[in-house]
Amino acid sequence: MERPRTDRVFGVETEYGCLVADETLGTPEAAVEVIKDCIFYEMKLGAMDVHSRDEVFEPAQCGGFLMNGARLYIDAVGSHLEYATAECRSLKDLVANDRAGQRHIVRAIREMELDDAVSVYNNSVDHFGGHTFGCHENYLVEANDELLTDRVEMFYPFLVTRQVYAGVGRVGGHLLSANAFRPNYQDVVDNPIDYIWVSHVYGVLPDDSVNFQLSQRADHILKTIASRVRFNRAIINPKWEHFYTYGGKTRLHLLYGEANQNEYAYALKVGTTSLVVALLEDNLVPRSLLLANPVLALRQVSRDEGCKWLIQLEDETTISAIDLQREYLKLAERYRGESDQTDWILNEWASILDGLEKDPMALGDKIDWVAKKKIVEQYMAEEGIGWQDDALQSVDLEYHNIDPEKSLFHAIQEMGETARMVDELDIIDAMTDPPSNTRAKGRAKLVREVMERKGRKYYVFDWNGVALDQLTYVEMPDPYETYEHAVGN
């Protein structure tokens, strides 16, 4: 039986920031290695890679797959901790699996009694160093060349404007400058992976002309689409990779995204995007929605502190981000009735746009940038300081601390001031249980099997298959299949 158009597999990769308060513990790079090793070797939550997935970017022992179907590892580019959710088909599963990864990291820090010295952040910008790191979304899409050639332009207007409800907000801004930073020979020798395949390098300078904006990453986006994205960040980073390519489907990798703390914003972002992907596959988005300059519009919407959010279309007419989102919503109404989840997305999409038009600042329970701005403004009023005070950047950062005992976001969530998609029991279950309706279930079962073995262990885990030993290989090419029949009792 053919699946509904909106039945889609998706997942999110989150790159975490780390700060070390006690220099005797070493660098943040050393701290995340210790966290990773604790999760695999002490807490025994997954199977550490005994092989190299990539000699440069993912060498042996850099991480592995967890019992909940997700993957946790150290990304060699920047040496940061990264968590990739299991393959999910429901927004609730996705949010729970993502938050479960945060809980694993926090638990590891506490197990090692490092919670006073090490903090991990689920944000997307380093205010002081000028770096930006991502929260990348992945959607299973038709492997159609037209999707990333002729039709991709119709995707940009939606992605540029969804920040009005999906943006996490940030204090201040950055200006990109080719002259602000140039690596010397020693920089390249010491950090070869950071500069491999780089055609140009930019630096950043603080921009005092903006007090607060919707997006943490808008200032750093240079292109609409690009395959080489180190110092060349784009909205879309096309990936034609084997583990998401099967049965005429492949992986669409969105580079421009941000780490939503609010569960509702997280779910709505992924949900609306999945419906727009269906519209693109069905070739239903008209060219009349094309933007004159998507990258410029991205910054204009983010930096518009008056919340007018006006942008120019290709035909030189002007439209608001809210009205442009409504155009996509109208088109997506054709999918109403396919599932309860689809109807929830459509209903909440309409509701959030109506709310933004009426009074954006009344949506602090559902939108991160609103909640953060309120916290920052309250701090300013209490301390009697202005927007240029450096202390505000620290307030901004602590909104994203993943430790519930330190996080400003978790403080308002504990007070019941945020809309939620899951409860604490859902997150606890997701720390060990994978989604029940994707191949993550079969792979997670094999992770447990390998971990229970005694003696020397030989195995190779990947998204699309598992080698249990030198003679046994379990293929898992279809993300929709659980492969329970292939993994025994």
Image (cartoon, rainbow, N blue to C red):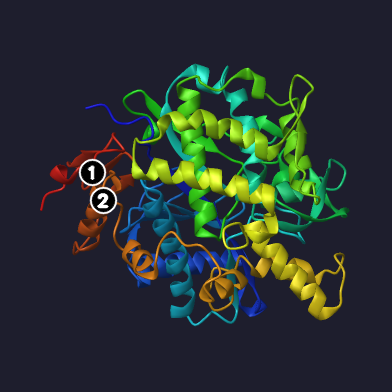
Please tell me in which quadrant of the rendered image residue 144 appears: top left
Q: Amino acid at mark 2?
A: Ser
Asked if residue 142 is positioned above or below residue 342 in the image, the reply reads: above
| Residue 236 appears in the figure | no
Number of marks in the rendered image:
2
Please tell me in which quadrant of the rendered image residue 22 appears: bottom right
Q: Marks 1 and 2: in contact by CB < 8 Å? A: yes
- Quadrant of the rendering where the N terminus is positioned: top left
* Residue that protrudes farthest toward the left in the picture: 489
**Which label belongs to residue 287?**
none
SS at mark 1?
loop
Please tell me in which quadrant of the rendered image residue 155 appears: top right
Residue at (50, 19) in percent of width and height: 283
Residue at (48, 31) in percent of width and height: 332
Q: Closer to the camera: disc 2 or disc 1? A: 2
Residue at numbered disc 2: 436
Q: Residues within 10 Å of mark 1 (few under 14, many from 20)?
A: some
| Residue 198 appears in the figure | yes
SS at mark 2?
loop
Q: CA distance from mark 2 to mark 1?
A: 7 Å
Asked if residue 414 is positioned above or below residue 223 in the image, the reply reads: below
Q: Position of residue 388 (x, y in %)?
A: 87, 65
- Residue in the foreground of this view, choosing between 263 and 452: 263
Residue at numbered disc 1: 482
